[in-house]
Amino acid sequence: MRVLLAKDEKEMSNALVAILKHNNYSVDAVYDGADALDYGLSENYDVVILDIMMPKMNGLEVLEKLREKGIHTPILLLTAKTEIEDRIHGLDMGADDYLSKPFAMGELLARVRAMTRRKSEFTPNLILVGNISLNKENYELSNTKSSLRLANKEFQMLEMLMNNPKRLISTEQFMERIWGYDAEAEINVVWVYISYLRKKLASLDANVKIKAVRGVGYTLEESE
């Protein structure tokens, strides 16, 4: 499960990221509303956690723009106890839940679990392209005869490709969405993981291939 966390207090953000990752969530952290909107528009998240008070664009503005663009990802608002009108306004604008600060970490996790359960009632856990399927619950890649489990970053990369078949995804997009802006990873790590995925697709006799556009990025296309 992928979570986008938008919170400008970096110390608190780091603590939330650590707890979410410890509970097997993959997390992207951003620190202002402009980045939250940019990341949220990718539709690659199972849950978005938005603090209302953020620089550049507040959480309510981000929520409004995401919903205007047709993004239906479940959104949890983090609010101060005094922001009653903001909570009401946020729910009316399409937020799925809110949590008042300060909050217990256990309650945050419970709210996220509840939102992902509700989403799973409407969103299939399997992504199908060609003769392969990707299970978003257990990271399993399979065909009708066999299956294998992907590592976390392999899963995230293939999920991006399978959600956007035939669409070019740049190396920079992979870096930003999976490793993050501040990651120390070198950009050639994308090529390394693409190589891993190609081998795993080949081992399943997949009729889809990851094609490279030299110096630009990668697409997932069905074999002719």
Image (tube, rainbow, N blue to C red):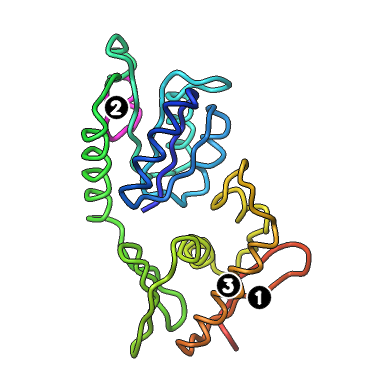
In the rendering, at what x and y percent does residue 193 appear?
Answer: 58, 68
Q: Which residues are magenta?
A: 89-99
Instruction: Determine whether 193 is above or below 17 in the image.
Output: below
Which residue is tagged 2?
91
In the rendering, at what x and y percent does residue 7 appear?
Answer: 46, 28
Q: Earlier in the sequence, mark 2 or mark 3?
A: 2
In the rendering, at what x and y percent does residue 177 appear?
Answer: 55, 50
**Which of label 2 and label 3 is nearer to you?**
3
Contact? badges 3 and 1 (CB < 8 Å): yes
Contact? badges 2 and 3 (CB < 8 Å): no
Q: Amino acid at mark 3?
A: Leu
Decide if residue 53 is on the left or right side of residue 187. Answer: left
Q: Nearer the viewer, residue 164 or 49?
A: 49
Q: Nearer the viewer, residue 111 or 18?
A: 18
Based on the picture, tell me whether residue 12 belongs to the magenta stretch. Answer: no
Which residue is tagged 1?
211
Which residue is tagged 3?
220
Decide if residue 169 is on the left or right side of residue 82. Answer: right
